Image (spheres, grey):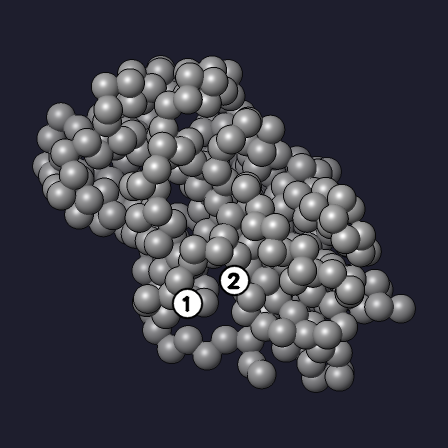
Amino acid sequence: MKSNNIQRESKEMRRVYRDFLAVEGVKDSSVVAFEADLSGSMATADLKDVLNERYVNVGIMEAQMIGAAAGMSVLGYKPYIHTFGPFATRRVYDQVFLSLAYSKLPATIIGSDAGVSAETNGGTHMPFEDLSLMRAIPHIRLYEVSDDVQFQAVLKETLVGNHLNYIRTIRKNPYPIYEEGENFSEGYKRLRKGKNATIVASGMMVEEALKAADSLAGKGVEVGVIDLFRIKPLNLRLVEELQGAPVVTAENHNVIGGLGGAISELMSEHSPVLVKRVGVQDEFGQVGTSDYLKEIYGLTAETIQNTVQEVLE
């Protein structure tokens, strides 16, 4: 079984977000979009012509943006808030925690340029800690989307219910994993079955996981692959999916507090198995291309493959 046979061009993730707001903002007068001087980066600048006063670029004032979004939420609007991942989490943590979460106000926060996809913006702009921070907020829903089809589906899901959502994404073209019409209601997708071990990955690491599984299959090792795109709340069916064989997690994030931590906590409490985490090993970010940084931090199919072989020894 090959990792992926999707024959289509993927759509830039920022275009998915922009087009979602343009379409839903016309249909639903409660949709309001906030930017913090990154409308050029996220391709949302022309939303002003579509949403009019419901498109607000506050400038480089992220904390004030969260406060304004909270005020709009109080009035019954559906705020969509975008900035780079570290500014959407680390910089505004108190405002998100108190003005939105503690106040039980629904909103959707988009943290773009996830992990090494921040590239030449360097360590100050490279979020390896955003999921860890946001996981600690009570009742929040956390997503890391792996391709454009999934991103569109998750965005549509945010239109219903009164949740505070954080969606972690890259800005540019993802590796295409899904076809249109895929059902994402479970919060995870099993992409490959395997009896020897399971790789649980999110975001750009799903591609690397599939490549690793293909390579291991050539060596006679059957490895499952799960795309865990909703990291909180976890679907408890994952316990059944993962019991009985070692698990390797793979994330474009610090191994502390992110996907690997969530899976380790889940399995240790419900059905203990060996969990080994592939990800950033408690380091800061730095300048570089995504491909270069993936090698530097071990975010590669080769690292995943070696880790699977290690847990099977």
In the rendered structure, which disc, 2 or 1, sits on the residue that comes first in sequence? 1
- For residue 129, above or below residue 154: above
The residue tagged with tag 2: helix, strand or loop? strand
Question: CB atoms at circles 2 and 1 under 8 Å apart?
Answer: yes
| 128 w.r.t. 150: above or below | above
Residue at 56% in and 81% down: 2
Q: Which residue is mark 1?
A: 178
- Numbered circles on residues, count: 2
Q: Residue at x 28, y 51 (%)?
A: 15
Q: Residues within 10 Å of mark 1 (few under 14, many from 20)?
A: many
User: What's the CA distance linking mark 2 and mark 1?
Assistant: 10 Å
Q: Is residue 284 left or right of residue 10?
A: right
State the image coordinates of residue 85 (x, y, percent, origin top left): 48, 35
Element under label 1? Answer: loop
User: Can you say which quadrant of the picture contains the N terminus?
Assistant: bottom right
Work out whether 99 lies above or below 274: above
Q: Is residue 7 visible?
A: yes
Which residue position is annotated with label 2? 189
Q: Residue at x 48, y 56 (%)?
A: 186
Whole-percent x, y for residue 239 in the image: 67, 55
Apparent side of residue 42 relative to residue 201 in the rendered image (left or right): left
- Using the image as rendered, state which of residue 122 and residue 254 is in the foreground: 254
Badge 2 local density, few (<14 within 10 Å), some, or many (20+)? some
**Picture coordinates of residue 299, whole percent (x, y):** 65, 55
Q: Residue furthest right?
A: 313
Viewer-side residue, 293 vs 45? 45
The residue drawn where x is 49% and y is 32% is 140
Three-letter amino acid code at the position of disc 1: Tyr
Find residue 81 and name its label.
Answer: none
- Residue 164 locus on image (x, y percent): 42, 31
Q: Nearer the viewer, mark 2 or mark 1?
A: 2
> Would residue 312 be found to the left or right of residue 182 on screen?
right
